[in-house]
Image: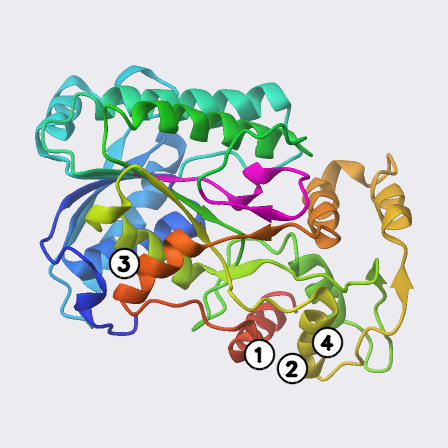
């Protein structure tokens, strides 16, 4: 991991941090960030992922390229169980030692039932809050939400808004909004910060990403298309495509979780100068050495195609992406912009790293 100025973290004192959400990529990226800062990171992992988590932690501690002073260890547990499924000894230790929580654990795959989505995303948040209430040294609970709790609204979504009568397009948006509502109620008792990233794409320095879904469906089609073929875009693609690289989101959330002015507040993490869909996929085509998209498939037709029984079971994410593709919703980020500027943290423009995203996709889809 590239060396960074440690002053980007608003509180330079190392902390003991509990992270949920392993093995998702952003959780892994966050754990690396915290360990590099010198923190003691407790990685909450379900039983089925404990082996993977221990290997990940071992690799972290074995890599001293950045003169890492922090440590990470795995705690077996489950966010849906009482005391997060931890043993009595681990629960007591967490309550005595943990100073910061990053709650990333959530179901995002839209192919599962709304009931299961809600159980994990809402009940999981409730269990995290219950444990947080017993933590004697807690300085911050950073809840990772999503900008798309705004649902199918149009216009401008403010950071301080949540439930404003919007329609939710899927169970993910609705369950994340309900989880965030729990956090807002708990702000009277706990030092909570909520972050709402837009669509998270790969690392701007490495291109690394966990899944090739969402915007990657069309990226993959363009990058791996025949040299003289042109991939059509759904809709006109004239609206901004709200994407942010994973490394920016991790840096921003890490910083806000230690900024005193972030307590009890919500922050949109977005690209302040997003490209339109046409501009982005043109840039992808240019970086891949492929023809730019020339034709447009009506978005309603694209959605009907993706709803066909023969393919609908594996394209839920792509159908959701099409909903976002033609949305004119804009996300105000005044709260985030003011605080992040203090730490010198800003989202890179996608034009500066699109070639890195393309290189990663090409390498892993051959």
Q: Classify mark 2: residues with Cα within 10 Å, few (<14), some (14-19) or many (20+).
A: some
Q: What residue range appears in magenta?
A: 142-159
- Tell me the element at label 1: helix
The colour style of the image is rainbow
Q: What's the CA distance linking mark 2 and mark 1?
A: 5 Å
Q: Classify mark 1: residues with Cα within 10 Å, few (<14), some (14-19) or many (20+).
A: some
* Place of residue 215 in the rendered image (x, y in percent of width and height, measured from the top left): 66, 58
| Earlier residue among tags 1 and 3 | 3
Residue position marked by numbered label 2 in the rendering: 287
Q: Is residue 259 above or below residue 361?
A: above
Rendered image: mark on residue 282: 4
Identify the residue at image location x=64%, y=35%. 110
| Earlier residue among tags 4 and 3 | 3
Visible in this render: residue 251? no
Residue position marked by numbered label 1 in the rendering: 355
Identify the residue at image location x=43%, y=20%. 123
Q: What's the CA distance linking mark 2 and mark 3?
A: 29 Å
* Place of residue 294 in the rendered image (x, y in percent of width and height, measured from the top left): 87, 74
């Amino acid at each position: 991991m590239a060396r960074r100025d440690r002053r980007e973290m608003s509180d330079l004192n190392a902390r003991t941090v509990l992270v949920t959400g392993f093995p998702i990529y952003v959780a892994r990226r966050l754990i690396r960030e915290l360990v590099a800062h010198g923190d003691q990171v407790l990685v909450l992992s379900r039983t089925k992922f404990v082996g993977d988590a221990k290997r990940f932690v071992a690799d972290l501690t074995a890599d001293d390229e950045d003169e890492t002073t922090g440590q990470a260890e795995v705690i077996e547990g489950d966010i849906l169980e009482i005391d997060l499924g931890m043993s009595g000894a681990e629960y007591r230790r967490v309550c005595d030692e943990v100073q910061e929580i990053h709650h990333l654990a959530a179901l995002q795959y839209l192919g599962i039932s709304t009931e299961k989505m809600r159980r994990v995303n809402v009940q999981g948040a409730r269990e995290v809050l219950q444990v947080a209430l017993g933590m004697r040294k807690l300085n911050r609970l950073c809840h990772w939400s999503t900008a798309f709790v705004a649902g199918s609204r149009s216009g401008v979504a403010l950071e301080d808004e949540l439930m404003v009568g919007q329609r939710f397009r899927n169970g993910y948006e609705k369950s994340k909004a309900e989880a965030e509502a729990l956090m807002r109620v708990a702000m009277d008792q706990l030092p909570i910060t909520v972050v709402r990233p837009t669509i998270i794409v790969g690392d701007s320095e490495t291109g690394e990403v966990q899944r090739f879904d969402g915007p990657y469906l069309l990226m993959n089609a363009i990058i791996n298309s025949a040299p003289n073929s042109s991939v059509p875009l759904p809709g006109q693609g004239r609206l901004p495509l709200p994407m942010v690289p994973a490394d920016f989101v991790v840096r921003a959330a890490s910083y806000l979780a230690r900024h005193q002015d972030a307590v009890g507040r919500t922050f949109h993490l977005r690209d302040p100068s997003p490209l339109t869909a046409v501009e982005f996929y043109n840039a992808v085509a240019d970086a891949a050495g492929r023809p730019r998209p020339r034709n447009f498939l009506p978005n309603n037709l694209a959605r009907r195609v993706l709803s066909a029984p023969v393919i609908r079971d594996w394209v839920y994410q792509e159908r959701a992406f099409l909903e976002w593709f033609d949305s004119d919703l804009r996300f105000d980020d005044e709260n985030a912009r003011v605080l992040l500027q203090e730490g010198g943290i800003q989202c890179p423009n996608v034009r500066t790293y699109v070639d890195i995203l393309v290189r990663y996709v090409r390498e892993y889809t051959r």
